[in-house]
Image (cartoon, rainbow, N blue to C red):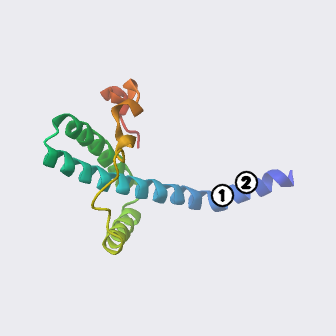
């Protein structure tokens, strides 16, 4: 009986902190992904590659939807994280040149066909 009470007490005390930390990590990851995709789109415009540019723009739109979800859920936290992300990009700027194959994580074959259909991409809030 006491084990159950202690477990519930632990969950009630630390569970909101855990959820906040998960939101911080996810928002930070999507911020980096958005910046990376914007640089890739600029590269495809410079190289005049229409196919990869359309794919990267689709991924960027999906990433923007995820960021909007976090911004609606926790507006103050996302404001602070955007400020901190901007400061870190000023202090530690991204690379100017990337190695060959560095955009392989954004290839189309890494996503399933169900992911590409619009009815499967509906976000839940």
Residue at the spot 25% in from the left edge and 52% down from the top edge: 38
Q: Nearer the viewer, residue 34 or 120?
A: 34
Please indicate whether residue 41 sits to the left or right of residue 112 in the image.
Answer: left
Q: Quadrant of residue 122?
A: top left
State the residue lying farthest toward the right: 1
Instruction: Tell me where residue 1 appears, x and y as whole percent.
Output: 86, 50
Q: Quadrant of residue 120?
A: top left
Q: Nearer the viewer, residue 125 or 25?
A: 25
Residue at the spot 20% in from the left edge and 50% down from the top edge: 43
Residue at the spot 19% in from the left edge and 45% down from the top edge: 44
Q: Nearer the viewer, residue 47 or 41?
A: 47
Tags 2 and 1 touching, CB below 8 Å: yes
Residue 103 sits above or below residue 93 on the image: above
Instruction: Tell me where residue 6 appears, x and y as whole percent.
Output: 78, 57
Distance Cα–Cα, label 2 vs label 1: 6 Å
Residue 63 sits above or below residue 118 on the image: below
Residue of label 1: 12
Local secondary structure at mark 1? helix
Q: Quadrant of residue 5?
A: bottom right
Instruction: Tell me where residue 103 appears, x and y as whole percent.
Output: 34, 45
For the C terminus, the image quarter is top left
Please indicate whether residue 2 sits to the left or right of residue 71 in the image.
Answer: right
Instruction: Tell me where residue 89 appears, x and y as whole percent.
Output: 33, 68
Residue 108 sits above or below residue 85 on the image: above
Local secondary structure at mark 2? helix
Q: Which mark is residue 20?
A: none
Residue of label 2: 8
Q: How many marks?
A: 2
Residue at the spot 31% in from the left edge and 42% down from the top edge: 62
Q: Nearer the viewer, residue 24 or 86?
A: 86
Crowd around label 2: few <14 · some 14–19 · many ≥20 (10 Å): few
């Amino acid at each position: 009986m006491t084990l159950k009470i202690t477990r519930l007490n632990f969950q009630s005390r630390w569970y909101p902190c855990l959820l906040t930390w998960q939101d911080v990590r996810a928002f930070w990851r999507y911020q980096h992904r958005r910046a990376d995709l914007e640089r890739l789109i600029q590269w495809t415009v410079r190289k005049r590659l229409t196919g990869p540019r359309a794919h990267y723009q689709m991924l960027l739109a999906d990433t923007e939807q995820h960021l909007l979800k976090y911004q609606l859920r926790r507006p103050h936290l996302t404001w602070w994280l955007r400020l901190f992300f901007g400061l870190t990009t000023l202090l530690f700027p991204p690379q100017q040149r990337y190695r060959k194959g560095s955009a392989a994580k954004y290839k189309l074959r890494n996503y399933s066909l169900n992911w590409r259909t619009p009815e499967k991409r509906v976000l839940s809030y």
